[in-house]
Image (cartoon, rainbow, N blue to C red):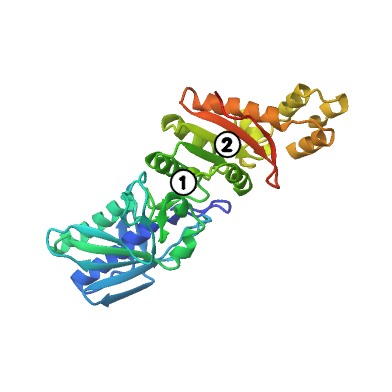
Amino acid sequence: MTTKTPNELRRGWTTGACATAATKAAVSALLSGSFPDPVNITLPKGGTTDFALASHQIIENGARAAIIKDAGDDPDVTHGALVTSTVRPLVTGRGIVFKAGPGVGTVTRPGLPIPPGEPAINPVPRKMIQTAIEEVCASLGAATDWEVEISIEGGEALAEKTLNPRLGIVGGLSILGTTGVVRPFSCAAWIASIHRGIDVARASDIKHVVGATGSTSEDAVRERYQLPEAAYLDMGDFAGGLLKYLRAHPVPTLTMAGGFAKFTKLAQGALDLHSARSQVDFSLLEDLLAEVAAPPDLLELPKQANTAKEVLDAALAQGLDLATPLAFKSRSAIRAILRDAPISVEVMIIDRSGNLLGETGFEP
């Protein structure tokens, strides 16, 4: 028996796992006459888990079951959402047909794991659902031809808080999960979304993409360039996740935009720019001040400064531009990560009000 320590975060379950459990319960009810509750499913990486049903009913020519998603201690927008599966038997030979119910999106752009026109139910959840149906049908001697409609209560509104609109997934959320398990505060989901964004941009023949650390920086880039929505990759703090994937899947032109402190860390070679996972090296700020011929008193400031902004503000007060040399150092660090990938890079340093502090222009 595993004991949870006070600081240990509780894991949860993906929308894909919830949809699988709901589907298995509904198919079981139509074939056996009763809903299993709890319902047990097999996880993609092995092992099983049980889900309690939130609701269930037999409907005309079908059955419906629902699970309340528990994301554990992860700050997931779908935590507490009602995930429902409605199943109907099909004629022999149709196989399993997936439909997007209310709150589940439809793919409209190429480049995602699911082709345009299909419900945004990712490959692993599809396989989980298929396996669950096959298990039930094999045990009861039934055919595996079913229509499976997945819906998420309030999913269309929740989707506005995700990357789905930018990726061209319209009408709701995606049914996600590669393991069935949500690991609390994992960076993997965000990085995976960045990768899918690059895939969509490439499939849409977009030649210029943008990686910004936040909405203020992104808005500054939008004012300069008229780019399609899919060009904006919502990088956040995960510069390494974006750049490493671009190295293997290049797009010709890249604009990187962000604040002074975060790009100080990028110039140092940090791949994750979050304050909890990388720190400003104030010696780099000393080098920048020396580069712009700062007076002696200012050259000493980084030794006792608390933040990069404190150094920047002091330099600006004396008419010194630290942002432009920082932009060039950042571009050099970006190039080191991209290696010889055929990508022309520019860097823009943006302040908290959205003003441009410094930039490099594009590489030749």
State the mark number for residue 28: none
Residue 307 in sight in this render: no
- Image point (32%, 59%), residue name: 20
Quarter-wise, where is residue 317 in the image?
A: top right
Residue hosting label 1: 230
Residue type indicated by callout 2: Met
Residue type indicated by callout 1: Ala
**Placement of the C terminus among the 4 image quadrants:** top right
Expressed as whole percent of the image width and height from the top left, the position of residue 45 reads: 34, 46
- Image point (82%, 32%), residue name: 319
Q: How many marks?
A: 2
Circle 1 Cα neighbour tier, 10 Å, few/some/many (<14 / 14–19 / ≥20): many
Q: Secondary structure beneath disc 1?
A: helix
Residue hosting label 2: 256
Left or right of 203: which side holds 8? Answer: right
Q: Secondary structure beneath disc 2?
A: strand
**Image height of 42 relative to 362, above or below:** below
Left or right of 133: which side holds 69? Answer: right
Expressed as whole percent of the image width and height from the top left, the position of residue 280 reads: 69, 34
Left or right of 283: which side holds 134? Answer: left
Mark 2 to mark 1: distance in Å? Answer: 15 Å
**Image height of 306 relative to 99, above or below:** above
Residue placed most toward the observer, 47 or 94: 94
Residue placed most toward the observer, 231 or 264: 231
